């Protein structure tokens, strides 16, 4: 079994993570997230056209008719001619904008030549409330995990796990700000899944830490944490590579509808392993030392 000093690399990893988090905060206040219809408000229409229509042709048509479109993408196989239109919110009544799309398609391709499969309308106030609720859900999830860890193990384990979860969520949000990919309810679901995956990995290592503590009371905190990490590393690598493999397949070949979800998942799986090793575990050592010094 290899004996790698993971805890000793905490300073370098901590500086890297701090730089990424500060960069995310700066981008959040300067560039901001590209909120989707769920959070910004607007109209989302899924339409199937029974003619040979391409994505560029439909985009040109909507631009010519001055439809306030923020995004247009093809869904599924190109031969199905299904498209998803996302329309902006600040250019008139939402119902009027929704009707405008139907009028433009009818004028161009004729009545009965297309089918509206989905027509979702979200007002700006409802979008803002959803945005607040989504971030509250993330906060409550992290708080519940902190309470669970404090009860399941010991209070010294909770701060490290929470720091790791906040670290992962913050950096993923930073990736979405940097790429300006749409941040929607789908991405919030991905963040919640990542929180669950990351804490599961952390709990496995914490369990091993407790076993080593009970069996070897004379070992220092650094020795216990390093031994726990080295003993569980093969399990961590196998599990993470399995999840990452599936996530990468769905990212590249799953289609545009789920692309952003698995973009977040792919980053989250990598960050989950990194933060468990270099954030959660070393933070636990720091918390224990601080508690003893304070006492």
Image (spheres, rainbow, N blue to C red):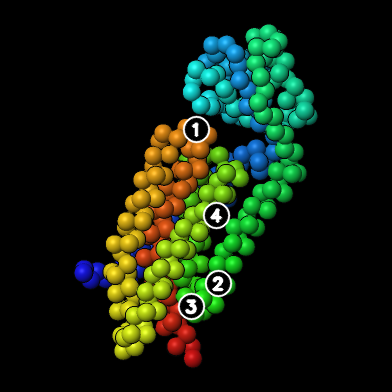
Between circles 1 and 2, the one closer to the viewer is 2
Image location of residue 93, percent across then percent down:
78, 29
Task: Locate residue 134 relative to residue 239 in the image: left or right.
Answer: right
Q: For the point 51% across and 58% down, which residue is it? A: 195
Task: Locate residue 133 relative to residue 188 in the image: left or right.
Answer: right
Residue to which mark 1 is pinned: 256
Residue to which mark 2 is pinned: 148
Q: For the point 36% across and 54% down, which residue is it? A: 240
Q: Is residue 30 visible?
A: no
Per the image, label 2 sits on a secondary structure element best described as helix
Crowd around label 4: few <14 · some 14–19 · many ≥20 (10 Å): some
Mark nearer the N terminus (3 vs 2): 2
Give me the C-alpha separation between circle 3 and circle 4. Answer: 22 Å
Mark nearer the N terminus (3 vs 4): 3
Per the image, label 1 sits on a secondary structure element best described as loop
Give me the C-alpha separation between circle 1 and circle 3. Answer: 42 Å
């Amino acid at each position: 079994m290899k004996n790698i000093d993971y805890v000793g690399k905490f300073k370098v990893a901590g500086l890297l993570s701090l730089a990424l988090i500060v960069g995310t905060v700066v981008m959040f206040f300067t560039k901001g997230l590209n909120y989707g219809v769920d959070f910004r408000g607007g109209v989302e229409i899924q339409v199937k056209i029974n003619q040979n229509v391409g994505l560029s042709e439909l985009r040109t048509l909507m631009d010519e008719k001055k439809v306030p479109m923020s995004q247009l993408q093809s869904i599924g196989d190109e031969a199905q001619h299904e498209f998803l239109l996302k329309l902006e919110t600040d250019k008139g009544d939402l119902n009027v904008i929704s009707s405008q799309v139907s009028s433009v398609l009818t004028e161009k391709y004729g009545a009965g030549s297309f089918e509206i499969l989905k027509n979702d309308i979200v007002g700006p106030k409802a979008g803002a409330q959803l945005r607040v609720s989504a971030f509250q859900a993330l906060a409550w999830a992290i708080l519940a995990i902190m309470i669970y860890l404090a009860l399941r193990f010991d209070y010294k384990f909770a701060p490290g796990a929470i720091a790791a979860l906040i670290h992962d969520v913050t950096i993923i949000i930073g990736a979405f700000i940097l790429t300006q990919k749409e941040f929607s309810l789908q991405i919030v679901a991905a963040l919640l899944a990542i929180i669950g995956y990351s804490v599961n990995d952390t709990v496995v290592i914490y369990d091993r830490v407790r076993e080593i503590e009970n069996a070897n009371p004379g070992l220092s905190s650094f020795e216990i944490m390093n031994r726990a990490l080295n003993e569980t590393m093969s399990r961590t690598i196998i599990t993470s590579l399995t999840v990452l493999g599936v996530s990468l397949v769905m990212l590249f070949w799953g289609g545009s509808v789920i692309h952003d979800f698995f973009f977040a998942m792919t980053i989250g799986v990598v960050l989950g392993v990194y933060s468990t090793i270099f954030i959660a575990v070393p933070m636990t050592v720091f918390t224990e030392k601080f508690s003893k010094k304070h006492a």
